[in-house]
Amino acid sequence: MCGRYALEATKRELWDRYLLGEMEVDVEERAEIFPTNSTPLIMPGNELVHHRWGFMEPFAKRPLINARAETVLEKPTFSQPFRTARCLVPATAFFEWEKVGEEKLKRKIFVSDIPIFSMAGILKTYLDENEKPFTAFSIITTAANEQMRAIHDRMPVILDPEDEAFYLDQKADPNLVWKLLKPTEHRLLIQ
């Protein structure tokens, strides 16, 4: 599960990290991003765009903010977006709640050697109440790695930087891209 994350990075830091082209949109540093917020994403060609977090399916009572890696190629809601509309979701941390006794403690989790990391995202376009199209994204999650297991059994897919271009290649074989959807081996810093 990934229910909130942070992007505490300047426009320049994102530009440097992703080798972005001309950036017409501004970027606001955000200590906490919530479902339905519009937030920066990296598209093929290293283009930065803003889209809303959470698929807005008619059958769902709330936005679908996560897609499970194990079933992303099978579930009708997520299969086509994974095959043809993948994006990177830049983050500087993600949040998870650890159950300690009767309490739930909010933990902020960083990737130790990647100050701005990329979570695997997928996109889908919908029509709003005025029949205007808008695009939303969902973050792909996977089983927790060893460090995360004490806190939660799921975590976002954090892509290795060298795999990002392949993940964004919409012509790549989805079955090969799917193999990237695994728990990160990078060390996490948990606060």
Image: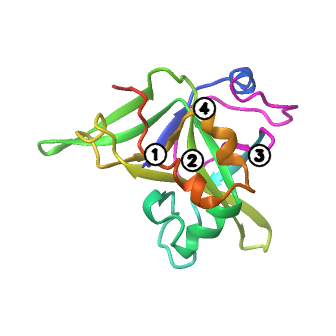
The residue where tag 2 is placed is 120
Q: Write down the region rendered in magenta.
A: 17-46
- Callouts 2 and 3 close, C-beta under 8 Å: no
Q: Amino acid at mark 2?
A: Ala
Whole-angstrom CA distance, mark 3 to mark 1, is 20 Å
Q: Earlier in the sequence, mark 4 or mark 1?
A: 1
Instruction: Tell me what residue is drawn at x 72 percent, y 73 percent.
Output: 129
Q: Position of residue 58 (x, y in %)?
A: 57, 78
Say which of marks 4 and 1 sits in front.
4
Is residue 22 left or right of 111 when viewed as pictured? right
The residue where tag 3 is placed is 44
Q: Which mark is residue 175?
A: none
Instruction: Tell me what residue is drawn at x 54 percent, y 22 percent.
Output: 115
Whole-angstrom CA distance, mark 4 to mark 1, is 15 Å
User: Would you say residue 29 sits in the magenta stretch?
Assistant: yes
Whole-angstrom CA distance, mark 3 to mark 4, is 14 Å
Instruction: Tell me what residue is drawn at x 44 percent, y 47 percent.
Output: 182
Q: Earlier in the sequence, mark 3 or mark 1?
A: 3
Q: Earlier in the sequence, mark 1 or mark 2?
A: 2
Q: Position of residue 50 (x, y in %)?
A: 72, 46
What secondary structure is found at the residue carrying circle 4? helix
- Callouts 1 and 2 close, C-beta under 8 Å: yes
Q: Which mark is residue 161?
A: 4
- Callouts 3 and 1 close, C-beta under 8 Å: no
What secondary structure is found at the residue carrying circle 2? strand
Q: Which mark is residue 156?
A: 1
The crowd level at tag 4 (other Cα within 10 Å; few <14, some 14-19, many 20+) is some
